[in-house]
């Protein structure tokens, strides 16, 4: 991991002063690289690429895709990434708004999205957008944090410890009431507690924090649009996703999917995963 440059997110996660955070996030990226082996020789998009640590690790892995495009909202992050990867012909970066251009439709063999959907106010809208970017038969690799069940208790403890240690980004964690914690422990596939919208003074779209995010709801949204092949967890992959820190969705866009709707008549395999 020391071969990765310490971008903003890498500094907070992979190089955190708290060992459990380093281990959890480091494992997440290693899982991402392992699950990306089928993308060798293909064109992929990292939707919300951050400081592009994922691309760095892919280039070091020996099975990097032929073309890697990172999309980000912040122009400063894009410029920093372009400087970091200036010598790599395989890697490029674009503003998220560029993905609305018609030439981006069905332009990617795979879309990867890590730790983004927990913040989105309208996840269905963004899933439709991603589906439109993927070629028929292409793949979606998506990870989100587990914020329900037993993991939420562990995470709240770790976040409190990080805040006590003065680690940046954890001092503003929103606390749970006892009632909210109880509902989070036993959450089903419906929204279990209210979610707070955070509005930025710079006019950016409102976002959610982690509190109240329910990965089971996202699973059902994905299953309505794509065929889910596998749902797994990390950092310990042999544990149930419900007991992990993150959950991974690996899905395939059906060959019969229309560009406009992202919907298909062949969703039985995906629905079987949801109902399992």
Image (tube, helix red, strand yellow):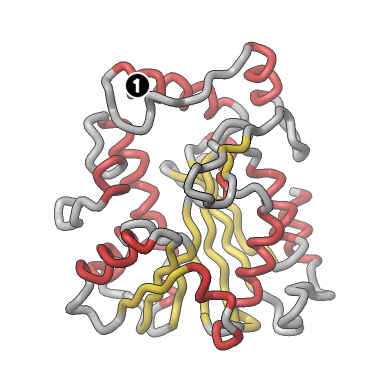
* Residue shown at the point (20%, 51%) measured from the top left: 6
Query: Can you see residue 190?
Result: yes
User: Height in image: 266 above or below 11?
Assistant: below
Q: In screen coordinates, is 265 left or right of 262? A: right
* Residue shown at the point (65%, 83%) measured from the top left: 136
* Residue shown at the point (77%, 62%) measured from the top left: 224
Return the residue nearer the eye: 170 or 205: 205
Q: Position of residue 213 (x, y in %)?
A: 62, 38
Q: What element does badge 1 sit on? A: helix
Q: In screen coordinates, is 60 left or right of 26? A: left
Q: Residues within 10 Å of mark 1 (few under 14, many from 20)?
A: some
Return the residue nearer the eye: 194 or 26: 194
Q: Position of residue 245 (x, y in %)?
A: 48, 38
Quadrant in which residue 150 is drawn: top right
User: Height in image: 28 above or below 256?
Assistant: above
User: Height in image: 92 above or below 33?
Assistant: below
Q: Position of residue 249 (x, y in %)?
A: 58, 57
* Residue shown at the point (44%, 68%) measured from the top left: 71
User: Height in image: 127 above or below 102?
Assistant: above
Q: Residue placed farthest to the top in the image?
A: 178
Q: In screen coordinates, is 190 left or right of 153? A: right
Quadrant in which residue 258 is drawn: bottom right
Q: Position of residue 39 (x, y in %)?
A: 43, 76
Q: Residue placed farthest to the bottom in the image?
A: 103
Q: Which residue is mark 1?
A: 163
Quadrant in which residue 161 is drawn: top left
């Amino acid at each position: 991991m020391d071969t990765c440059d310490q971008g903003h997110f890498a500094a907070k996660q992979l190089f955190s002063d708290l060992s459990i955070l380093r281990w959890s996030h480091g494992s997440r990226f290693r899982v991402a690289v392992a699950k990306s082996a089928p993308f060798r020789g293909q064109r992929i998009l990292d939707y919300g690429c951050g400081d592009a640590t994922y691309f760095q690790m892919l280039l070091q892995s020996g099975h990097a895709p032929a073309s890697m495009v990172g999309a980000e909202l912040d122009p400063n992050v894009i410029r920093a990434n372009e400087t970091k990867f200036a010598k790599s012909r395989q890697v490029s970066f674009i503003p998220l708004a560029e993905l609305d251009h018609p030439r981006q439709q069905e332009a990617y063999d795979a879309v990867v999205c890590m730790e983004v959907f927990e913040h989105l106010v309208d996840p269905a809208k963004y899933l439709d957008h991603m589906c439109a970017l993927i070629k028929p038969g292409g793949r979606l690799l998506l990870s989100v944090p587990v914020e329900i069940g037993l993991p939420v208790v562990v995470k709240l403890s770790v976040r409190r410890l990080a805040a006590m240690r003065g680690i940046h980004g954890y001092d503003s964690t929103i606390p749970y009431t006892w009632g909210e914690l109880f509902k989070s422990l036993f959450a089903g596939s419906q929204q279990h507690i209210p979610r707070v919208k955070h509005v930025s003074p710079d006019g950016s779209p409102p976002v959610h924090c982690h509190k109240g995010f329910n990965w089971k709801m996202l699973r059902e949204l994905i299953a309505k649009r794509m065929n889910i092949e596998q749902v797994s967890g990390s950092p310990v992959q042999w544990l149930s996703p419900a007991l992990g820190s993150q959950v991974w969705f690996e899905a395939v866009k059906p060959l019969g999917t229309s560009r406009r709707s992202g919907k298909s008549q062949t969703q039985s395999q995906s629905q079987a995963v949801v109902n399992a």
